[in-house]
Structures are given as C-alpha cells and as structure tokens.
Amino acid sequence: MPVRPPAVLVIVGLVGIEIIAVMALAVLSVIYAPGEGISSATAVLVFAFVLIAGALAWGAKGLYEGRLYARALIVVWQIMGVIIGTQIAVSGQFVPGSVTALVCGVVMILMFSPRVIKYLRKHYERELPGT
C-alpha cells in the first residue's frame, strides 16, 4: 500500500465535507420546494446535486487510491466552488460564501502541491504497461 502524503488525507477529508454539504443542499431543495409536490425544476436540481456529490465521491476515492483521473474531477468542482462562494460572499451572505471559497481554494492549492503531484504520478507510472 502506498504511503499517502498528509495533503492527500486533508483533501479527501475536505472533499468529504463538500459531499455532505452538496447532499444537504439536495435534501433542503426538496424540503423547501415551493408549492405542492416537487416540480420538474426541483427534480433536475436534486439530480444535479446528487451527480456532483457522486463525482466528488468518485474523485475522493480515486485520489485516496492514487488514481490520476481524480485530479480532474476534484479540481473542476473546486474552480466552480471558488466562483460560487465568491458570488455568494459578495451578494450579502459573507460567511457561507467565504467558507465555501476558502475550502475550495485550499483544496485546489493542495491538489497542485508537489507531494500530491508526485504521489499521483508515482502511482500512474506503476500502472503503465512495461514499467
């Protein structure tokens, strides 16, 4: 079993928190849906949240195992998270927006740290045929 750098464990933990937050948004979207029943727009929103949480879970699992594909899954969401968090912060909800942008920013910076890149590259090189 490969030795994981501490940054990988921090990333997996923070992404786990993001997964919980996204699933909480899905549940809250159903609980606070306007009107009687759930509209098609709410259903699409919940589906999108579940899809995002699933992609993040797959990415976190892949990162923990040292899979190179995980970087793309995680980084794309972090970019979106920084944008969404910044927009929330400047639109009047400073604390939730700032926390979102900060967590996503930290994860994104850690994803490009030398030890994480080396960890992913080392695992990738072991999977190549003929190596």
Image (spheres, rainbow, N blue to C red):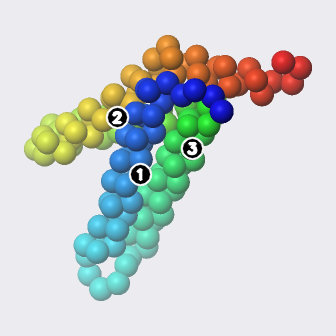
Q: In front: mark 1 or mark 3?
A: 3
In this picture, residue 74 sits left or right of residue 69: left
The percent position of residue 116, horizontal first and vertical second, equals: 52, 22
Q: Which residue is mark 3?
A: 61
Q: Secondary structure at mark 3?
A: helix
| Kind of residue sitting beneath label 2 | Cys
Give how far apart the Cα atoms at labels 1 and 3 are: 12 Å
Q: Please identify the quadrant where the N terminus is shown.
A: top right
Residue at 86% in and 24% down: 129
The reply to whether discs 1 and 3 touch (Cβ–Cβ < 8 Å) is: no
| Secondary structure under the numbered disc 2 in the rendered image | helix
Left or right, 120 with respect to 102, comes to right
Q: Give whichever of 4, 56 is nearer the camera.
A: 4
Q: Which residue is mark 2?
A: 104
Residue 32 rendering spot, x and y as whole percentages: 25, 72
44 or 8, nearer to the observer: 8
